[in-house]
Amino acid sequence: MYEKYKAQKFCDYNFTRLQNLEDELNNIVSKEVKGAALRAKIQWFEEGERPTRLFLNLEKSRQKVKVMKSLLKDDGTVVTDRETIMHEQVDFYKNLYKRESTDKNASSALINNVTRLLSPIDTRFCDEGLKSEELFDALKSMKPDKSPGLDGLTPQFYKAFWSEWEEILMRLFNESL
C-alpha cells in the first residue's frame, strides 16, 4: 500500500531498488543481531526466543558508545571524519611502538636498583613451558557454555575434542611464551 502511494507520488520512485535496499538492510540487521546475541550470551536467545526491543536498544547504545566521533590531535585540532580518525590512530601507535635507542645509563640504573629476584626454583618454573595438565585445568575452571575469545568456541568444545586439539594448543601456547 505504502509502495503504491510512493510510486504514484514520486515518478522517479524505483520499487525494485527499494526492495533490494530493504533486503540488504535486513541482512545487515540480522548479522548485527547474531553478533549481539553472541556477545551477550543471553540464555533466552540460546533457547530459540527472538531478541526483544530492549535487548536491541541496549546493543545499539553499546555500539554508539564504542564509536569514536572525534579525535583531538597533538597540534590541538579536532578531526571528525572517520578516515582521518583511523589514519591518526595508526600514526599514533606507529610512533608509540617505534624502535628507539635505549639510554644505557638509565637501563643500567633501573636494573641495578632491582632488589627482589626470583628464586632459582621460581626461575626454573617460569622457564619451563606450559604443561598439558595446567592448560586442561584452566579449561575445566571456565564456564562450559561461555565463549572466552573471538573465535566463539566454548571451553566445552575444547574439552570434548581435547585429544584432537591438545598437541596443537600446547605448541601454540608454548610458542607464544
Image (tube, rainbow, N blue to C red):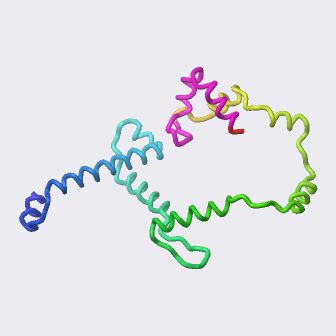
Q: Specify the segment rendered in magenta.
A: 146-175
Q: How many marks?
A: 0
Relative side of 35 to 127, left or right: left
Image height of 157 relative to 72, above or below: above
For image coordinates 47% across by 62% down, the residue present is 67
Front position in the image: 77 or 37: 77
Q: Position of residue 115 (x, y in %)?
A: 93, 52
For image coordinates 54% across by 23% down, the residue present is 160
Q: Which corner quadrant of the image does residue 1 belong to?
A: bottom left
Residue at the limit of the structure toward the bottom, as seen here: 76
Q: Position of residue 171 (x, y in %)?
A: 66, 30
Image height of 8 relative to 139, above or below: below
Relative side of 97 to 88, left or right: right
Magenta-span inclusion, residue 169: yes
Residue at the limit of the structure toward the left, as seen here: 8
Provide the major secondary structure of the magenta segment: helix
Image height of 34 relative to 144, above or below: below
Q: Position of residue 9 (x, y in %)?
A: 8, 68
> On the rendered image, what quadrant is the C terminus found in?
top right
For image coordinates 70% across by 33% down, the residue present is 174
For image coordinates 84% across by 62% down, the residue present is 103
Relative side of 134 to 123, left or right: left
Magenta-span inclusion, residue 87: no
Front position in the image: 154 or 46: 154
Front position in the image: 51 or 17: 17
Front position in the image: 164 or 96: 96
